[in-house]
Image: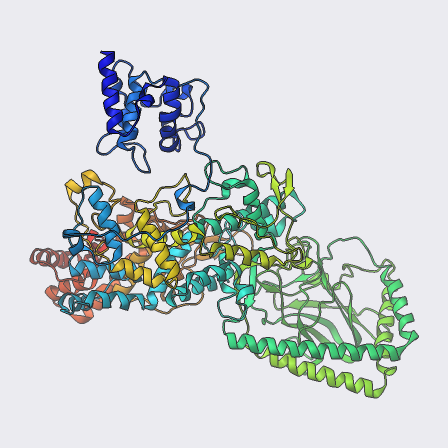
Amino acid sequence: MLKRAHHLLFSLGFLLGLTFPVYGAEPDTFFREQVAPILQTKCLRCHSSETTEGELDLSSAAGWLHGGVSGDLFDANDPDASLLLEYVSGDDPMMPASGPPLTDDELELVRVWLSQGANWPEDLQLSLPGADLNWWSLKPTEVPEIPTLIKAGAVWARTPVDHFVYNKLREQKLSPNPEADRRTLIRRLYYDVIGLPPTYEEVEEFINDEDPLAYEQLVDQLLNSPHYGERFARYWIDIVHWGETHGYDKDKPRPNAWPYRDYLIRAFNNDKPYERFVREQLAGDVLYPQTADGIPATGFIAAGPWDFIGHAEVPETKTDGQIARNLDRDDMVTTTMNTFVSTTVQCGRCHDHKFDPVSMEAYYSLQAVFSALDRADREFDADPEMAEQRITLAAEVLELEHQLQSKHQEAMDHAGPELQELRQQLAELESSRLKEQTSAFGYHSEISKSADTEKWVQFDLGTETAISQIVLIGAYDDYNKIGAGFGFPLRYRIDVAEDAAFTQGVRTIVDRTETDQANPGARPLSFTLDETARYVRVVATRLIERSSDYHLALGEVMLLGEDQTLLSVAEISSKDSIESGERWRKQNLTDGKYYGAFNALESFPAYLHLLNKEQQLLKTAIPVEVQQQIQQSQEALKNKKSELATLPAKQKVYCGLVYSGSGTFTGTGNNGGQPREIFILDRGDVGKKLKPVSPGTIPAIPSAAQFNLPEDHTESDRRVALADWIVREDNPLTWRSIVNRLWLFHFGRGIVDSPNDFGRMGQQPTHPELLDWLAVQFRDGGQSFKSIHRLILLSATYRQSSAYREQAAAVDSDNRFYWRMNRQRLDAEAIRDSVLLLSGNLNPELYGPSFQDFVIKNPEHSPHYEYELYDPTNPESFRRSVYRFLVRSQPQPFMETLDCADPSERVPKRAETLTVLQALALLNNGFMLHMADTLADEIENESNEPESQVQLLFRKVLQRNPEPVEQELFQNYLSQHGLANSARLLFNLNEFVFVD
């Protein structure tokens, strides 16, 4: 018997191309050399000591003997009946759950091992293969030869894409489906390319068009539609997890995030070359600063969530602040590498990647690229010509300021030693001011969304009173670590009047409204006057920015009489006030308590006297001609600044930038944009720094991982270097990644069905030659998105029917080899947009700020986004869903039910579920009810005949006429339940919700 078995093994070895010694080897050797590699590559991804799916660990002898939830994998009495063989063999093997099944050769080796007793050396511990550059995605892209097809294949194929697909089908003994009918094709194209349905008339015209190029012309028409950019931008938004709130605990809104979304729409509509597209998003502010897209594109860097508390409320010197910034850089790195090169580098934050060539050093080198950046609003000019004009005027203003500074220095020289002595006395008095950093309680207005909102505080002296001096002292906010001068207006004036309403005898006695004023910080601003008035009003005409809003704050206002004594104020009023306990209230403005108050009460009049004397000396000691020159320079500067101020205000975009802040959130801008030093962190612990790293990337391209920048390089040089590395012609990841995303966009699954992970933990390509051919075509053919879209859309593969064939499904149940077109459910946006369009409500306006379909509560602290309080019939929300304001913490219930992507997560591929909740939402959601009502109204305006109404309803919603049986059924239903309810039924049909 043993002799016969050896003859059998020899025969099998001969047939499989194996030598006899393999089978005749010692069991230990046979397992180590032949079986262990199979388990490593095909099983350990899911069944190891770290990932024990089904409670099965195949990394050790102990794990093998223990088995899993299904029991023992080895049957010693009947090895061929072992559970392991049952899982990995057969026409449709259960395992591996992902990736290609075991080959016939591999199955035979496993059978032989089991027949020998399934020996596993106790000292052998298996792990996934080590990281190297021999993995498929890291090999150089090559131009594969287009397979030659004969007979049926040659007739079927329309583009080179089909040659690769048909060749793979033939290997699997499969054949493609016939082409779909024209009604199906036009609906498929419309939804796929622009996310909207065609009209009944467009469908009929296409069906009856005898032009053999009708399909090609329709493809071109849709790719040139501005709605294409809206459709594809929404897909990209999923990938980069862009949202319009911060996420985390305080999910504050980002009112200026939308220009990045508009950038995406423009980029796709204009078919921006991919190399430029990548460069702009990583370093557009330095590579293309004068263009309309350069700065908005860097919204990519800030697309993800941001920990407001960890950045704005906790100093960077604290551990929690360092953790927040470490995680923030991790998000930037992960999003960049997932998006552009389909690589999961984030494992490197705590340890070397176990499966891919990503060391901790490589990961932290990538963090160093972004180490100078934070997330905040940045101004930009949407019009390049306006930007050029603004730059020219700003340069002229700077030159005039230098001239004025020179004139002032000349004036100082004329003032001589007396001025120096005065300033020495002022300095001595300054030293007597309180040094404690205690908060000076003062006045704080309500928040405004615009800088040009007037705010005022008013003082009633009780009777007409002589006023010799008014002193304004800025607030000091130590609560938020902002410091002196908090909330002091950029422009302001002081008015007096005869009545409290300021309607009679109004005069302006101090005017600082022409140009922005420097913030005084802790130094009092004194105005010498000779006035008599009862009512005095300090009016802020341009507010200072706080973070993303504006307000007025003052610490103290002193009104002095003829003898330099403080005047008594009968009443203080204001346009508005937050009146927050003792900390902020109007009454604090005259309480004598402010930051930097003098220790000795008598010191303040002396201080004011010296300030006035200084001002008088500067007026009298300077020659008239110098004063005239200063006045002329001031006038010229004022005019030039006015000219600059008349230009349209810049837009803002929330993006990655070198931020200059105050208080807790300072950024690196106050340090000249010097990048933070980045260290390898032991297990990702910010308290355990190992060695510092230089900016670099992963070793996907030999000898290109370190950027080798000069010592005096800027932070932007780092981002440019990373962008250069990504778009290198020899970067094998970049070009495969993007064409795989384009394929997934059209077919619902990628050639690599793990679009963010081309590593060992991801999927392998089903059609590697096709992937490389598309990558090279894209890279070397102008990097045009639309050209690849067109190539795919014109293919016979894309144009197949989605009809199910049982025999084909038995071989390829998941349609991995594309023997038919995948039937797909409309995504949430396409459903919502279609209902808006079909009901006649869609506002097709492109671009601009997002609409908010919620009511926001507590916007200044921890906002709540209340969708149920919003009126779904409000026309302001009738724009396409790509313009919907995306909230991270509280998703829109209707859209979430329909599987809309979560902006807190990177979503390279939408989930597609079928639930009862979806049907209920389509039937009963307030938005759907209103759309059904307006569609019914529109149809009733066209016809009052039930027969015609049913026909119109079918034409609008399904773009076809009803079948006779449908006509009869719906007429009966309409007569009982009305036209609006009939519309709701059609909106729930699979024919509406699915694309074949």
Q: Does residue 896 appear in this view?
A: yes
Name the residue: 35% across, 25% down. Answer: 35
Q: Residue furthest top?
A: 1
Q: Nearer the viewer, residue 110 or 491?
A: 110
* Between 602 and 417, the one nearer to me in the picture: 417
465 left or right of 450 in image: right
Q: Is residue 496 visible?
A: no
- Left or right, residue 973 beside residue 305: left
Q: What colouring does the structure picture have?
A: rainbow
Nearer the observer, 87 or 18: 18
Q: Quadrant of the N terminus?
A: top left
Q: Is residue 229 above or below residue 753?
A: below
Instruction: Report which quarter residue 187 is drawn in.
Output: bottom left
Q: Residue at x 45, y 24 (%)?
A: 125
Q: Residue at (68%, 47%) from the top-left corner? A: 317
In the rendering, at what x and y percent does residue 524 appear? 78, 67
Q: Quadrant of residue 562?
A: bottom right
Say how many tags the image has. Answer: 0
Residue 358 position within the rendered picture, expressed as x and y whole percent measured from the top left: 50, 42
> Residue 940: horizontal and vertical position, in percent?
19, 68
Q: Is residue 357 above or below residue 837?
A: above
131 vs 698: above or below = above
The percent coordinates of residue 974 (x first, y second) are: 14, 59
